[in-house]
């Protein structure tokens, strides 16, 4: 009897999927994923990306764990309060799947550092909580021709969208939100039902794995989740010719 292959056993359900199989799982295992923000959304996304065998997972978050995070940010516990999120998350995920490479970046990536991180990644997941970061990440993804998966959550509502990697004929994040509006609601002031960020983060991981495995995707579609009704709806994001990043003047 041939010896068991622990990695094949771990990946067995992916290998059995016709849409993934050996070729798709190998692409996942060779991929580099950059995750911006390891909060409620990022924790769920990172957990599934790591357990699914993404070869290189880079976690970027400069924040520390706070008591108020523990209800929804499932990679942290009371003993982690005060520690850097990126470091704690990387340690826990490495225990989950020691066969992958995980890098913790406990600082805010900007400028050339952000551009380098994006250009060396196959897909970027943005779970950050402010427009300044989202615009910078989007601009770097457009410049590098990198797929961007963006998600957010507030109260009982969540949304996610996939952009790129070809931005010549499809929209970018700035086609959806052209200007920063930091007056919009945030979780701190308006609350969020704990599982909602997890739903969005899980769906972002689904989209990332689909992209890496070569499963057909629908870029430029905003998906909205209403936890109160349990319903999803979709809105097409149109490419704007006046978009400052991917439009004619970009």
Image: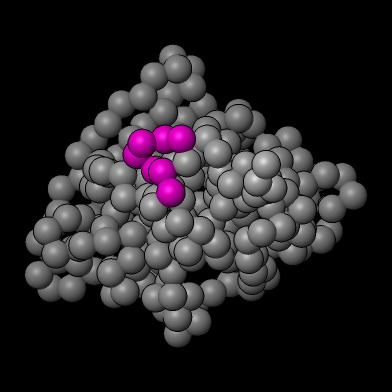
- Give the prevailing secondary structure in the magenta stretch: loop
Look at 44% across and 75% down and name the residue there: 120
Question: In front here: 163 or 90?
Answer: 90
Q: Is residue 21 magenta?
A: yes
Q: Could you say where residue 68 lies in the image, as x and y percent from the top left?
A: 75, 42
Q: How is the image coloured?
A: one colour
Q: Residue furthest bottom?
A: 112
Reply above or below: 133 against 76: below
Question: In front here: 122 or 250?
Answer: 122
Look at 63% across and 66% down and name the residue there: 101
Q: Classify residue 249 by image quadrant.
A: bottom left
Q: Which residues are magenta?
A: 16-22
Question: In front here: 145 or 177?
Answer: 145
> From the viewer's perspective, is 206 left or right of 78?
left
Q: Could you say where residue 126 lies in the image, as x and y percent from the top left?
A: 47, 56
Q: Please state, as top left, top right, bottom left or bottom right, where the N terminus lies in the image.
A: top right
Q: Residue furthest top?
A: 229
Look at 36% across and 24% down and name the residue there: 232
Q: Is residue 148 magenta?
A: no
Q: Could you say where residue 207 lies in the image, as x and y percent from the top left?
A: 39, 44
Query: How many labels sit on residues?
Result: 0
Q: Classify residue 240 by image quadrant.
A: bottom left
Question: In front here: 54 or 225?
Answer: 54
Look at 48% across and 45% down and name the residue there: 205
């Amino acid at each position: 009897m041939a010896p068991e292959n622990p990695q094949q056993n771990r990946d067995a359900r992916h290998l059995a999927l016709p849409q993934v199989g050996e070729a798709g799982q190998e692409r996942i295992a060779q991929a580099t994923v950059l995750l911006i923000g390891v909060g409620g959304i990022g924790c769920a996304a990172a957990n599934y990306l790591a357990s699914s065998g993404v070869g290189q997972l880079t976690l970027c978050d400069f924040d520390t764990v706070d008591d108020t995070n523990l209800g929804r940010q499932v990679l942290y516990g009371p003993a982690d309060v005060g520690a850097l999120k990126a470091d704690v998350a990387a340690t826990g995920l490495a225990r989950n799947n020691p066969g992958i490479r995980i890098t913790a970046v406990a600082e805010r990536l900007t400028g050339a550092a952000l551009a380098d991180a994006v250009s060396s990644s196959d897909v970027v997941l943005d779970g950050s909580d402010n427009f300044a970061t989202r615009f910078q990440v989007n601009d770097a993804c457009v410049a590098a021709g990198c797929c961007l998966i963006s998600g957010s959550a507030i109260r009982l509502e969540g949304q996610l969208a996939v952009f790129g990697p070809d931005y010549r004929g499809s929209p970018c994040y700035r086609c959806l939100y052209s200007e920063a509006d930091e007056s919009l609601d945030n979780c701190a002031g308006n609350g969020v039902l704990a599982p909602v960020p997890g739903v969005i983060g899980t769906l972002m991981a689904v989209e990332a794995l689909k992209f890496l495995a070569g499963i057909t995707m629908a870029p430029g579609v905003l998906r909205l989740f209403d936890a109160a009704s349990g319903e999803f709806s979709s809105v097409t994001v149109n490419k704007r010719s006046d978009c400052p990043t991917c439009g004619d003047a970009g």
